[in-house]
Structure formats: C-alpha cells, structure tokens
Amino acid sequence: MSENQGLLHLDELRALARRDEIDTVLVVFTDLYGRFMGKRFDADFFLESAAKDGTHCCNYLLTVDM
C-alpha cells in the first residue's frame, strides 16, 4: 500500500480492479458546503480512459448551490 493514508497509485488501483476489490472510482471535489460533486467511473474505464486523457466537469458546479 501507499505510504500516505488514502493515497492510491494507479498500479495499486489496477491490481485491486483486476481482483474485483474495486469496481468504481469517484472523481470528486467538494462544493461550498463540503458535499462531493463529480463523477463515478467504472474502474476499468477509468484506468483505460480518464486516468490517461483526463476528464471534464462543468465549472458551474463550483459556483452554485444545486
């Protein structure tokens, strides 16, 4: 495991996804009220796509209370 608690490197994520220990990756940030805002990715899709190419979110999520 990683030295920092809560930090997971891509190699570790890949191994855990292969063993079906992780199936979903949350890519989130907190809004003005501390709530998570973001996306859920299938772990395999995240490793094949989002981890390499990045992902997008609407800036609107950072400015308003939804």
Image (spheres, grey):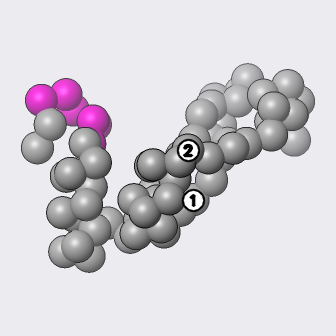
Looking at the picture, does residue 45 appear above or below residue 30?
Answer: below
Task: Point out residue 36 in the picture as x, y percentages from the top left corner.
Answer: 62, 41
Main SS class of the magenta portion in the image: loop
User: Which element is circle 2 on?
Assistant: loop
Of residues 54 and 5, the one nearer the viewer is 54
Task: Point out residue 31 in the picture as x, y percentages from the top left corner.
Answer: 70, 30
Name the residue beneath numbered marker 1. Answer: 40
Looking at the picture, does residue 7 appear above or below residue 40?
Answer: above
Name the residue beneath numbered marker 2. Answer: 54
Kindly identify the residue that appears in the image at 85 percent across and 25 percent down: 63
Kindly identify the residue that appears in the image at 73 percent across and 42 percent down: 57
Does the image show residue 53?
A: yes
* Residue 50 is covered by the magenta coloring: no
Q: Quadrant of residue 60?
A: top right
Q: Quadrant of the C terminus?
A: top right
* Measured Cα–Cα span from mark 1 to mark 2: 13 Å
Left or right: 47 in relation to 26: left
The amino acid pointed to by label 1 is Arg
Q: Quadrant of residue 47?
A: bottom left
The amino acid pointed to by label 2 is Gly
Task: Point out residue 22 in the picture as x, y percentages from the top left corner.
Answer: 32, 66
Mark seen at residue 56: none
N-terminal of the two: label 1 or label 2? 1
In magenta, the rendered stretch is: 3-8
* Mark 1 Cα shell of 10 Å, populated few (<14), some (14-19), many (≥20): few
